[in-house]
Amino acid sequence: MTAGIGIALLRHGPTEWTAARRLQGRTDVPLSPEGRAVVARWRLPRIDGLDWSGWSWRTSPLLRCRETAAIMLRSMGLPAAETDDRLIERGFGDWEGETLAGLRERYGPDMAEWEAQGWDFRPPGGESPQDVLQRSMGLLQEMLQHGRSMIAVTHRSVIRAIHARACGWDMLGRPPVKLADGCIHLFRLDATGPAVERLNLPLTP
């Protein structure tokens, strides 16, 4: 890591809704049995010059993240992670349980127009990416003030929002880098905000 503190983000393990490509949002879906087996194989990657032992752990309060963190921490002989509401998944409101493909088929041009709002795209009764970023940045700024690096078990929308902020992506079209599941995404944080350090570091040895 260069100057600043480190923020390492990883998405929870697979759920049945993950496999079905459903928008999970705040719906408290647990890991699937297959998901628990996948997470049991995850290990933090070895990176030259980086010692994970001094990093704190935080997790979204949703069950799929708490289970993921618990399995990983238990394998390392570490205590449970602290939960933080600011790491919770984007609320998708009325669309939770739906698939993007189904919504695009149902709403057609209207859906395309909504998605073209980028940072301000808000599902009915849900959150925009801007909302997600604002609450996430509150946590990052708190960690910066404490001067302690953090590993966060969270959700795709949180990771995408922080990545977009770090690289200047406007949340329209394809992201500059596809963020893979089963990986850890490492950012550097200083007074100017997050910056990309290394992305898509596999969690499986």
Image (cartoon, rainbow, N blue to C red):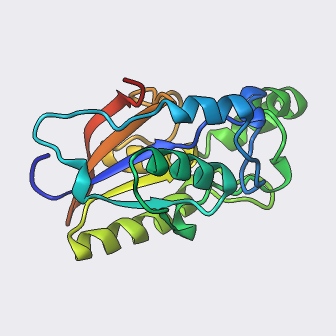
Q: Count every numbered label the image shows and give the total.
A: 0
* 4 vs 184, nearest the viewer: 184
Residue 28 in the image: above or below residue 185: below
Q: Closer to the camera, 122 or 29?
A: 29
> What residue lies at 61% left-to-right and 50% top-to-bottom?
67
Res. 150 image quadrant: bottom left
Instruction: Pick whichever, 113 or 188, lies toward us.
Output: 188
The quarter holding residue 185 reads top left
Give the left or right position of residue 158, taking residue 111 as reference. left
Residue 3, x across and y down, in percent: 9, 55
* Residue at image point 10% right, 48% down: 2
Side (left or right) of 79 relative to 191? right
Q: Residue at x 57, y 43 (%)?
A: 12
In front: 73, or 115? 73
Q: Quadrant of the C terminus?
A: top left
The image quadrant of residue 131 is bottom right
In the displayed structure, 6 sits above or below 100; it is below
Which residue is at the far right? 106
Q: Position of residue 98 (x, y in %)?
A: 84, 38
Question: Is residue 120 something one can see in this rendering?
Answer: no
Give the residue displayed 83% in from the left and 34% down from the top.
Answer: 103
On the question of residue 21 being in view, the answer is yes
The reply, left or right, for residue 166 in relation to residue 72 is left
Where does the image place residue 129, in percent across and percent down from the top left?
56, 53
Residue 192 x, y percent position in the rendering: 21, 61
